Image (cartoon, coloured by chain):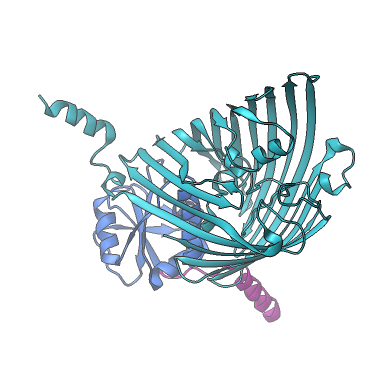
Amino acid sequence: MRRVPALILAATLGAGSVLAQQAPQFHGFATEGFLYSGSNNYLGMDTSSGSGAWIEAAVSGNEQISDQVRVGAQVHFTRLGKFGDSIASVDWALVDWKLNQRLGLRAGKVKIRWGLYNDTQDADPGYLWSLLPESMYAVDVRATNLSQYGAELYGGQRLGDKLGEFAYSLYYGYYFYAPNDGYMEGFREQGLSFTKRPGGITPGFDLRWKTPVKGLMLGGSLMLYNASGNLVNGAFRQPLTYWPAYYAQYDIGKLSLVGQYMRLVQYTDLAIAGEARSIALSDSRAWFSMASYRLTDKLQIGAYHTRYLVTSSGQESDPANHFYDSVVSGRYDVNSYFYLKLEGHYIDGNGLGFYGFDNPNGLKPHTNLLVAKVGFSF
Amino acid sequence: MRTRALLLTIAGAMLGLSPVRAQVIVVHSAAKIAEISRSDLRDIFIGASTSFRDGSRAIPVTLKDGPVHEEFLKNYLGRSNTAFLALWRALLFAGHGTMPQAFDTEAMLIDRVASAPGTIGYIGVSTKCEKVKALVVK
């Protein structure tokens, strides 16, 4: 009789299935980044003196229980100057049930698909770039929006040779502002001190259309979120916010062209004891365009330009209300495990990535930045 | 006309477009499909698709390295081995899947495809493949 439950379990999980015969997979990576800037300190590091305080590492494990069910988890460590973890944290941990090409379900701590790169932005080995566009994938605040505690439905459908195919992601979950990233530093610099870190719901979707034009993909995402938290002397609230992004990618051979646009309209409601209630509006828009080209099997080069504007300020020409970044980049893969990256930035404005704590004498309007990185992955 | 052909060849080489070479795409002998399009093959091997046109599950398997592996990647995926690994690592580190099973030799790959319905792999054109079914690539 004891065999019956075992047989039922085996039948349910498909113990004899093809994928389940594979051994569990363990992979990881580690990177070290060095940043040098000509003037302002950037991303919470002492970059004007040259800083190597950017370290990242991750280890993931995956077990395919059956052809349809996978369990996996990844721990990730980021240290970015003042920001990041003192110990590794769980990046994602999930059960992935893929019924077929059209329908799958991931549940647990799941990465959020938003725009082209949100869910993969902390996987450095996958990119040419050392720094993704700060306007949308800011490395100093990414920990907050990377993943959520909840579930994601995903899949795709072929529409025929003349219509291409689409892929979708639909999710709902909960998130918390990361305890030690740029968002919290920004709040601190506004004089806000939390007794309960803000968090809320984060539903959303991503839809990508692989068009009949070979290599052309178009897509759009919408992430919604709200937040509430307790301050030492009051309450913090952000009502439901809509965060759309629209993007296109065109790959032809060794050349890849990418563009993305987003707009974020956000209200922050502060109720502080002894002060009048304040509701602040921030309306920001950003876009980037990228081009990359693989020169050889080991060498890839590229450039991008991004712009971020706080349009609600009414003074977009003020360096505090914009951030323009022109970037050239190169990556050399020494072998299948080691790679090197070198990247130059010319930044106009300081609306993103610059903080008062490490720029006590104020900010200059322009910043030249050099980033060098070495990485290892397996 | 010669100049035009030469320019097209140079442009194609710069964009990484290369003519089809000699690899044989193989699947389990019980597979119902007899042919596969280049775009479907590419999608399966870059993780964008997990099924064949008939709806059945497609599970890519690869060689670890070597000329057959590199030629396959170049001809059908337009990627180097390092770019191929970078792509899969991005998916893997985002929690979206696992790397394709990779084998040291073509014989090991054939054994795997022969014993596992749904798997799809590739071998050199001179390699015997009686145990598996060869697909026509359209």
Q: Residue at x 41, y 40 (%)?
A: B55
Figure colour of chain A:
cyan
* Residue toward you, A327 or A169: A327
> Magenta region: which residues?
B1-22
Q: Is residue B138 left or right of residue A186?
A: left
Q: Is residue A125 left or right of residue A325?
A: left
* Residue toward you, A51 or A33: A51
* Residue toward you, A348 or A5: A348
Q: Is residue A166 left or right of residue B49?
A: right
Q: Is residue A190 left or right of residue A332?
A: right
Chain letter matching colour blue: B
Q: Is A140 a magenta residue?
A: no
Q: Quadrant of the N terminus of chain A?
A: top left
Where residue A187 sits, quadrant-wise, is top right
**Residue B60, above or below A153:** below
Q: Residue at x 60, y 34 (%)?
A: A177
Q: Residue at x 55, y 37 (%)?
A: A168
Where residue A264 sits, quadrant-wise, is top right
Q: Position of residue A280 (x, y in %)?
A: 79, 28
Q: Is B5 a magenta residue?
A: yes
Q: Position of residue A245 (x, y in %)?
A: 69, 39
Can residue A83 be seen here? The reply is yes
**Residue B110, above or below B3:** above
Q: Quadrant of the C terminus of chain A?
A: bottom left
